[in-house]
Image (cartoon, helix red, strand yellow):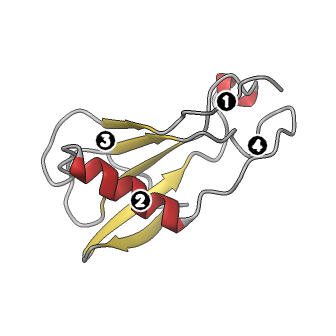
Amino acid sequence: MALVRKGSRLITVDGTAYRWRVRGRPTYDQGLVRSPLTYAVEHAEASGTTLVVTTDQPHPSNWFGTQGSPILPSHVAVSIRTARANGWSPECPGSPFHLDRSAGFDSSH
C-alpha cells in the first residue's frame, strides 16, 4: 500500500527518509470522536510495509469541534523509532505494521 504523494510530508529519521500523511477527512468513527486520529508512514524511496500509527488525539476535522494537538514531526520521529525498535521493516513487503499510541484517548465529546 503506497501513500498518496499529495498531502504527504517528508521526514528524515536517523539518516533514512520517510513519507508520512494524515488522512484529510475523518472516517465515520473519527468524525464522531469514537476513534482517534491515525496517520501512515512509509519509506520514501523503497516500497514496503506501511506503518499505521494510532494516536491519542481526535481527528482535527471531527464533527463536534473537539480540540486535539497537532501531529508534529517530532511525534512522527518518535513513532518511527518506536516501530523500528518493535520490528517494523519499512523496506520489506508485508501487511501494514500497527503502532497503537492511543492510551489516554477519551472518546466522550
Give whichever of 62, 58 is nearer the camera: 58
Question: Secondary structure under badge 2?
Answer: helix
State the mark number for residue 30: 1
Determine the CA span between mark 1 and mark 2: 23 Å
Determine the CA span between mark 4 and mark 2: 24 Å
Task: Name the spot of residue 2 as percent of width and height, x first.
Answer: 33, 48
Question: Secondary structure under badge 3?
Answer: loop
Q: Is residue 72 left or right of residue 14?
A: right
Residue at mark 2: 78
Determine the CA span between mark 3 and mark 1: 21 Å
Question: Quarter of the image containing the N terminus?
Answer: top left
Question: Secondary structure under badge 4?
Answer: loop
Task: Name the spot of residue 89 as percent of width and height, x first.
Answer: 17, 49
Tag 3: amino acid? Met
Name the mark nearer the viewer: 3 or 1.
1
Seen as rendered, the residue at the extreme front is: 104
Cβ atoms under marks 2 and 3 closer than 8 Å: no
Task: Name the spot of residue 27 as percent of width and height, x first.
Answer: 63, 29
Q: Is residue 35 left or right of residue 96?
A: right
Among numbered discs 1 and 2, the one appearing first in the sequence: 1
State the mark number for residue 79: none
Give whichever of 28, 101 is nearer the camera: 101
Q: Is residue 105 above or below residue 6?
A: above
Tag 1: amino acid? Gln
For label 2, the crowd category at 10 Å Cα-Cα, with few meaning under 14, some 14 to 19 and many 20 or more, is few
Q: Is residue 24 left or right of residue 38?
A: right
Residue at mark 3: 1
Q: Is residue 46 above or below residue 60?
A: below
- Which residue: 23% across, 32% down? 95
Residue at mark 4: 61
Determine the CA span between mark 3 and mark 4: 24 Å
